[in-house]
Amino acid sequence: MKKLFFLFTLVFLWFSGQSQGQGNKTQLAYQYYNSGEYEKAAQIYNELYTQNVRNYHYFNKYIDCLISMEDFDLAENRINSMIKERPQDITLYTTLGNLLERQEKKEEAQKIYQRAINSAANDQSGISKLGNAFVNLRKYDLAIEVYERGMELMAPKDYFSSNLANTYRRKGDLKNAIKYYLYSLRTRPQNVNSIKSNFSAIFQKDGLEEGRNELKAKLYEEIQEFPDESVYPDLLQWVFEQERDYKKAMRQAKSLDRRFDETGQRVYRLAETARRDGAYEDAIDGYQYIIESKGQNSSYYFEAKQFQLIAKKKLIVDDLIFEKEDFKPLNTEYDSFLNEFGKNSQTAWLMLDFAKLKATYADDVSGAIGLLEELVELRGINKLIRARSKLSLADYYLVDGQIWEATLLYSQVDKEFKEEQIGETARFKNAMFSYYNGDFEWAQEQFDILKAATSRLISNDAIDMSVFITDNMGLDTTDVPLKMFADSEMLIFQGKYDQAFLKLDSIGLVYPEHTLLDDILYKKAQIYVKQKKYDLAISAYNTVIDNYTEEIRADNALYELAQLYEFQLADLEKAEGLYKRLFLDFSNSTLAVDARKKYRSLRGDDIQ
């Protein structure tokens, strides 16, 4: 037994050594070939082929070296010798034809190529190899001729349709590439996902609009010819999705679901895609289909009802022009949902969202507080949802003037999630509460700690607040101006904008030379944005940017003005210019990196 093991080890080590040696030789030959030392490369490739007679790569590289050395006679002799040794391997004729063509013997080369094609027999492997050989030589018309001959000789008739499609694609013949890709699906519909990948590549490289229009035209023909096949309407739905035409895609998805008695999964997934892409009306339509046609027994019923509410809310909010009254019907639908499914761990996430709707958009802070107080007491809910609920509840307590209840909840979340991002958020909110309350020294200590927060957003905000307090404390014999400003920020947080304006204006009147003047303008601009008074916001931001360049709010004002142009006013060119100005003029700003990314994104750069 020991002898057998010893022999096995020796054999294994010998083969390993051989393999490693060949690998080193291959690398050396490759280096010689790339550096133009063809004679040295030819010698090694010839040795490698002699040792691996089935490896045509080595033989072809050897012939390439001979051709590069213009030793055409030796190359031809070696190829002819190979043809005699292996007359059944018709791919050798392509090697000979290529040699003749390199010598400008084009007519002779064409005869050899045609001889290879005419020799193709009823053999799948042989036809594939010959076709690939022509493709490697970029002789696409000849490769097409080979595959077409294969289609004639072999069953099923579409056997080489994928090869034809790929070759037409390489040739740049979009129409025929699409034709044969679709043809291949007649007997192999299971390949539809790989075909979709091919189409994606075609459209990206060879022309988006032209390719999709051609594909749609062909698909309509296939659907008419094969009305009982699902693969073609499925592919048509996919094309509409690529075009982000979710209305047509949804129509196709619902038709497929009805015709083939599907579970609704197709429609649900499409609705989710549409919702994530901001096509809320089409998403709502898809969810409604699930609710009505599949009913309560559907595994998608609960999610469809839930995400339909989210889509309806986003549809109103993203319109940017809405009134409190617009949310009344939606408020009723949320209540109806909770009545149907109850208030429990399954609906906790929606309860949290409903509370935000009440407080932020429906001006019902007390209703939001009541809902969240129920939510934090529910058993069995996810601890992160409970923590987020506590933070939201604390925020609304602050808005409602219940300040000590708010700080208690912030502290609870901070203690429970001390090393996590949500804990840092709670800590920051508690520090802001201390700032609102006029306890600037303690607040600054917390902000200094939070400079090292794992969340870049929290870290940046903490840095801003720390610098802001430092700049505005101790400049006079009193910190009254800073306390007045903190009061105004608390009023803004509570949505009491008129009172906030009065407080801000009073600072400017009583302390006309104070360094808070740029901050006052900056805060006013933020209020104007909340009130959708965009012209006033733009004017205030520009005043900060132009007149207070050296102050700490200049970069913030520039960034938020760019955001205003990008999202509220949809003036992308203006936004792009402002982002560029920020990272060029304020390169040390914590916002510079993000501004550069946004600039590149608006410019159309490919950002990984």
Image: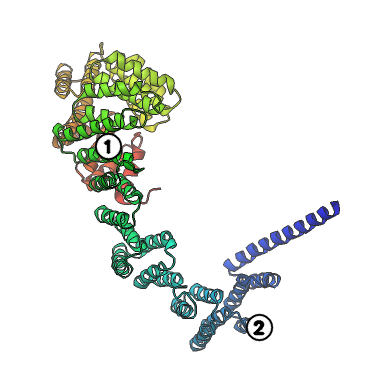
Q: Residue 120 location, x and y as percent?
A: 53, 82
The amino acid sitting under disc 2 is: Ser
Identify the residue shown where x is 23% and y is 13%. Answer: 480
Secondary structure of residue under mark 1: helix
- Binning the other alpha carbons within 10 Å of mark 1 as few (below 14), some (14 to 19) or many (20 upward) gives many
Secondary structure of residue under mark 2: helix
Side of 34 relative to 138 (left or right): right
Identify the residue shown where x is 65% and y is 72%. Answer: 54
The residue where tag 2 is placed is 81
Q: Residue 75 location, x and y as percent?
A: 62, 81
Q: Is residue 329 visible?
A: yes
- Quadrant of the rendered structure where residue 548 is? top left
Q: Residue 482 location, x and y as percent?
A: 25, 17
The residue where tag 1 is placed is 559
Q: Nearer the viewer, residue 32 or 13?
A: 13
Side of 126 relative to 517 (left or right): right
Which label's residue is closer to the chain start, 2 or 1? 2
Q: Nearer the viewer, residue 587 or 556?
A: 556
Identify the residue shown where x is 38% and y is 17%. Answer: 411
Q: Residue 311 location, x and y as percent?
A: 26, 41
- Quadrant of the rendered structure where residue 430 is? top left
